[in-house]
Amino acid sequence: MRHIISILIENESGALSRVAGLFSARGYNIESLTVAPTEDPSLSRMTILTSGSDEVLEQITKQLNKLVDVVKVVDLSEAAHVERELMLIKVRATGKDREEMKRMADIFRGRIIDVTESTYVIELTGSSSKLDSFIAALDAGLILETVRTGVCGIGRGDRILKV
Amino acid sequence: MMISGAEIVIRCLQEEKVDCVFGYPGGSVLHIYDALFKQDQVKHILVRHEQAAVHAADAYSRSSQKVGVALVTSGPGVTNTVTGIATAYCDSIPMVVLTGQVPTQYIGQDAFQECDTVGITRPCVKHNFLVKDVKDLAVTIKKAFHIAATGRPGPVVVDIPKDITAQMCEFEYPKAVQMRSYNPVVKGHLGQIKKAVQLLQEAKRPIIYTGGGVILSDAADKLTQLARKLNFPVTNTLMGLGGYPATDRQCVGMLGMHGTFEANMAMHYADVVLAIGARFDDRVIGNPEHFSEEKRRVIHIDIDPSSISKRVKVDVPIVGNVADVLDEILKLMDGGFTAEPEVADWWKQIDEWRGRDSLRYRQSEHIMPQFVVEKLYEVTGGDAFVTSDVGQHQMFAAQYYKFDKPRRWINSGGLGTMGVGLPYGMGVLMANPDAQVACVTGEGSIQMCIQELSTCKQYGLPIKIINLNNGMLGMVRQWQEMFYSKRYSQSYVTSLPDFVKLAESYGHVGMRIEKPEDVEPALRKAFTEHKNDLVFMDFIIDPAANVFPMVAAGKGLTEMILAEDL
């Protein structure tokens, strides 16, 4: 099962390696991991996309809570939430492909944020599956480079992760 | 008044009432050693290898209610401590390890004796710190002691760069620490506790299964009260020995891979298991699928939520400090909940299993290792602190020395570290100066930290070393005999030293005992005439002796191999 774990953690050096080390030491999956300071710079918010059985997920949240630097852990996928991922994709844009690329970016509500004679950089935000679909929709030979942030997510409505 | 970082370290130790530190000096900790020199409140024990410093600090904790402290230098000083830290971590032993680090401006430049201490120790500590500012030093050390000793205890490393120990700062030791990210649970959930009491009342075939958590939480008396009140059988894990008096009728002995027949059968066929501070590990329940074939309801009290439902599904989880939760249970049982379950039939069954006498061993013209431990028990009146290493001798000590008190059995249960026995003895004696201490070991294990004979001489630590010498790595040999068609690959120890001469060369007393009739007199002599000496007793034992009962790896608890089967 796919799960999105959100973690509030003390913004201290080494905090990331404690979390990453826990996952590798116990054999848990990390499909993506994103981290940045919150509005309170002493705290970082980390989002981990992982997968596993209910038992494994229970262990993951328990083990994360055990880390001394971790303030709070929540499994976002347990209830209503929104999730987004951002991708920057550099494509070849020459000849008839130049117009086609622009159209595709429009269809997926992407934005072209860098233009050269032969390339575009398209910025695309959405669910991970939307980003996957965009990649699938393009001619693979025209994709020069992609970079994705990994999933970040937030609970809907009154579901708030805060100290 | 401004004092140096090094002096702050020592003042912190004094504030924590640390009376002794195990350590080894080196470049990065010279300022700290200088500050240590200028005072006499904190004693320093100079070991011969950093690994032993950490083992000794670990045993200091295990055998008392205090936090052990080790102090080592950067680089190799730190890497040598890793085995000891991991050993303490696996058994949840509170400990603070202070490590020197190269000066701040050199970190990351591959300086002499530099290593990434925080990185190397991270997977085997409860937490670790790198101090980057002298102003944080005192509060970091305070946090280290707090984290080590609270919640599920464990080792904490504080890495201190050399320049920090030279800088001057005002010293103020915080009275308490507040950490928003660390607030371990103490009290158990009352609703869950009520459910547990209800379940205990309904039990027909109950068992109380206890581990190291009972010892760590100093809850042995409460456990005994509860068990007596309920008239339930009690089994201990290797780490839990002494949590309930082994000589009591209700004690069915240790369970698990080398547990008694009655303990394993009772655990497997129980309808209600009350697990207290134990974690259903692979050496305890064997194959989890086999274990789950039998229907039972499990109550699990543990301070660490991640230990609950990790390997065995739990029906009534109670997260909390064992002593506090047992208090609540006892209170509930006094007020209205009169638990007097009908367990007479169950006891009849258990006594029948007990009648198999699964710890009976064959007689031999050679010295049997079990016999040595039995005699050790008699000679010490069952009141010694027994440290051990890892292997057959460890199991013999666990099976045949009947521990009636907690914190008397000092061994590496989780990590299974060979070489701990002798430094453990040192730590026990520093915490309990007048105690009788026996180190039950083998010729393989003892050689892993043998250099500490020198430390023992320097500080006059009269450990009685019971070397069960079969010239073999006994447990490896036993597995090779049973599961590898007697291909004894690398389990035969040749070129052994003359242990008597070796002991004597360090200024200790050495004895070599080869006949069964000499066992008891030798032990008596060691514990009376040589009360104040370290005595190395080299017992030449039957090389074919094996540990039984045995649940082979991957087998179920009831699939024991008994000595009588062979």
Image (spheres, rainbow, N blue to C red):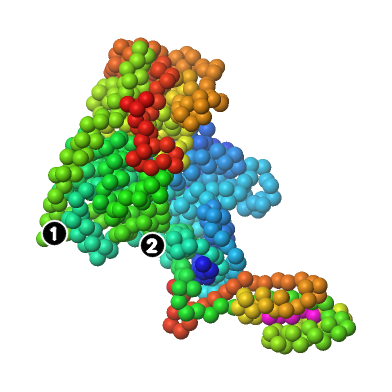
Residue matched to label 1: B337
Residue nearest the viewer, comparing B19 with B398: B398
- Please check whether the numbered discs 2 and 1 fall on a single chain: yes
Q: Look at the image and say whether residue B469 sits in the magenta stretch.
A: no
Numbered disc 2: secondary structure: loop
Residue positioned 37% across, 53% down in the render = B312
Question: What is the chief secondary structure element of the magenta stretch?
Answer: strand
Identity of the residue drawn at 48% across and 22% down: B472
Residue at position x 64%, y 72% from top? A149
Q: Quadrant of the C terminus of chain B?
A: top left
Name the kind of residue labelled 1 in the image: Phe
Q: Which numbered circle lies on residue B183?
A: 2
Q: Secondary structure at mark 1?
A: loop
**Disc 1: CA contacts within 10 A as few (<14), some (14-19) or many (>=20):** some
In this orientation, which residue lies closer to the viewer: B66 or B282?
Answer: B282
> Which residue is nearer to you in this view: A27 or B167?
A27
Q: Residues within 10 Å of mark 2 (few under 14, many from 20)?
A: some
Q: Is residue B247 rendered to the left or right of residue B486?
A: left
Is residue B183 visible in the rendered image? The answer is yes
What segment carries the magenta color? A120-124
Chain letter of disc 2 in the image: B
Q: Earlier in the sequence, mark 2 or mark 1?
A: 2
Residue type at numbered disc 2: Asn
Q: Quadrant of residue B181?
A: bottom left
Q: Specify the subunit that label 1 lies on.
A: B
Q: Is residue B454 visible?
A: no
Q: Quadrant of residue B233?
A: top left
Residue at (63%, 45%) from the top-left corner?
B114
